[in-house]
Amino acid sequence: MMDIQWDDKYLVGHPRIDHEHQVFVDLIRTVSLAADAQTTKERALRLLMEVKKYAEFHFVSEENIMIDADFPELELHKREHAHLLAKLEDELHRFRHDEIELGHISNFMFEWFALHTTKMDLRLARFLAEKR
């Protein structure tokens, strides 16, 4: 199991984004713990649906911040969000059909979160800080 924990290195400096990211990490951690606990497939699918719905909410929230700030990389960031949601849907399909384990999905989600936050979201946060 990957040790999925919040770390301040994921802070981008925008209170709302940082809060939403903390919730997202907590949801991913819940999925990871469920994988270790050999949770039923039905429960695992409900947890994964919660993560997916939260990701959709968070992406809209983040994109609204970008729109309000006239962030020049909005379209690139939106494409990145769409790519993640498509990949997540693919992973959910594979899990439903017993092609992958739950732990694989939690690792995928956390690795993507860490990479996206420290790259794409940090650029947004720096842009927002410069605008202030």
Image (tube, rainbow, N blue to C red):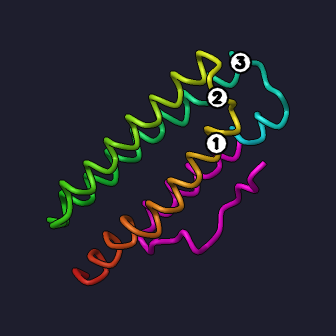
Q: CA distance from mark 2 to mark 1?
A: 11 Å
Q: Secondary structure at mark 2?
A: loop
- Who is closer to the viewer here, 103 or 50? 103
Q: CA distance from mark 1 to mark 3?
A: 14 Å
Cβ atoms under marks 2 and 1 closer than 8 Å: no
What residue type is disc 2 on? Answer: Ile
The disc, 1 or 3, on the residue closer to the chain's N-terminal end is 3
Horizontally, is 60 left or right of 47 in the view? left
Classify mark 1: residues with Cα within 10 Å, few (<14), some (14-19) or many (20+).
Answer: many
The disc, 3 or 2, on the residue closer to the chain's N-terminal end is 3
Tell me: residue 123, above or below residue 54: below
Farthest right residue in view: 37
Task: Please give the residue where the numbered disc 1 appears in the rendered image.
Answer: 106
Classify mark 2: residues with Cα within 10 Å, few (<14), some (14-19) or many (20+).
Answer: some
Classify mark 3: residues with Cα within 10 Å, few (<14), some (14-19) or many (20+).
Answer: some
Q: Tell me where the magenta segment starts and ends, as one range.
A: 1-30
Q: CA distance from mark 3 to mark 2?
A: 12 Å
Residue beneath the point at 31% across and 69% down: 124
What residue type is disc 1 on? Answer: Ser
Cβ atoms under marks 1 and 3 closer than 8 Å: no
Image quadrant holding the C terminus, namely bottom left
Q: Secondary structure at mark 3?
A: helix
Measuring from the top left, give residue 128's x and y in whole percent.
Answer: 28, 74
Measuring from the top left, give residue 109's x and y in whole percent.
Answer: 56, 46
What label sits on residue 41 in the rendered view? 3
What label sits on residue 100 in the rendered view? 2
Measuring from the top left, give residue 33's x and y in whole percent.
Answer: 78, 41
Residue beneath the point at 71% across and 18% down: 41
